[in-house]
Amino acid sequence: MPDAVPAVHLADLLFRWPRQPAPCLDIGEFVVAAGERIFLHGPSGSGKSTLLGLIGGVALPERGRIEVLGQALAALSGRRRDRLRADHVGFLFQQFNLLPWLSAIDNALLPTVFSALRRARAGAERPPRAEAERLLARLDLDPADWQKPAATLSIGQQQRVAAARALIGRPELIVADEPTSALDAERQQLFVDLLLQEAAANGAALVFVSHDLRLAGHFDRTVELAAINRAAGGGAA
């Protein structure tokens, strides 16, 4: 039986910010297997968020190959990269990127608005709104807060809404950038457990970026960015 296509495969990757003489990422190879759960860590400024942006197709490298779910990103138009991300990647951003005027539940449902595939998957067992409610409840967001505009929620509440948005519609790859920074210890554990359980239930790969090494033991593999980045110390976001 052939091996499953990796969720992420980077080869000979070089990325340099405009007007910067030195590259911030220089990676020979990095592979995330299908269904694998990776804990990626490194200090602030080591290039973690930049790497996630490249995996998401938000930026393209100066050199090298990025494949996500078997698709070479450089071979896709910007619109097709956007479609790949919308249909197959659940992003949990460090700054959340919620729409402040939308309610918590409508923010969680956004992937089902932009992706017919995510909408169909979210509605496979229950209506998409009910699936959003299930995720928000599991993330311990009080039902009284589900209809509130995102701008009125606390930072920790917004983080949980962003997590529900990333998970809805069963994406094959989940990318989480410092997702527990605004949570207390109890909710942090609840959050990580939910993320891992949802990823395992759906066979999704998970790339979880954090500087909190206490969480590393929950994952299949721990990767220090400096160990794979030959440009470590080059300066990055």
Image (tube, rainbow, N blue to C red):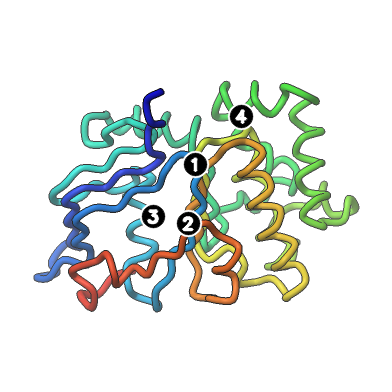
- Label 2 secondary element: strand
Q: Which residue is mark 1?
A: 173
Q: Amino acid at mark 3?
A: Leu
Q: Which residue is mark 3?
A: 52
Closest to the observer: 184 or 109? 184
Give the side of residue 102 with respect to residue 18, left or right.
right
Inter-mark Cα distance, 2 to 3: 13 Å
Q: Earlier in the sequence, mark 1 or mark 4?
A: 4
Q: Which residue is mark 2?
A: 38
Viewport quadrant of the C terminus: bottom left
Residue 133: give x, y in percent of width and height: 81, 41
Q: Quadrant of residue 22?
A: bottom left
Decide if residue 127 is on the left or right side of residue 181. right
- Please tell me how crowded label 1 is: few (under 14), some (14-19), or many (20+) other residues with Cα within 10 Å: many
| Mark nearer the N terminus (2 vs 1) | 2
Residue at 69 percent of width and 29 percent of height: 122
Mark toward the start of the polypeptide (2 vs 3): 2
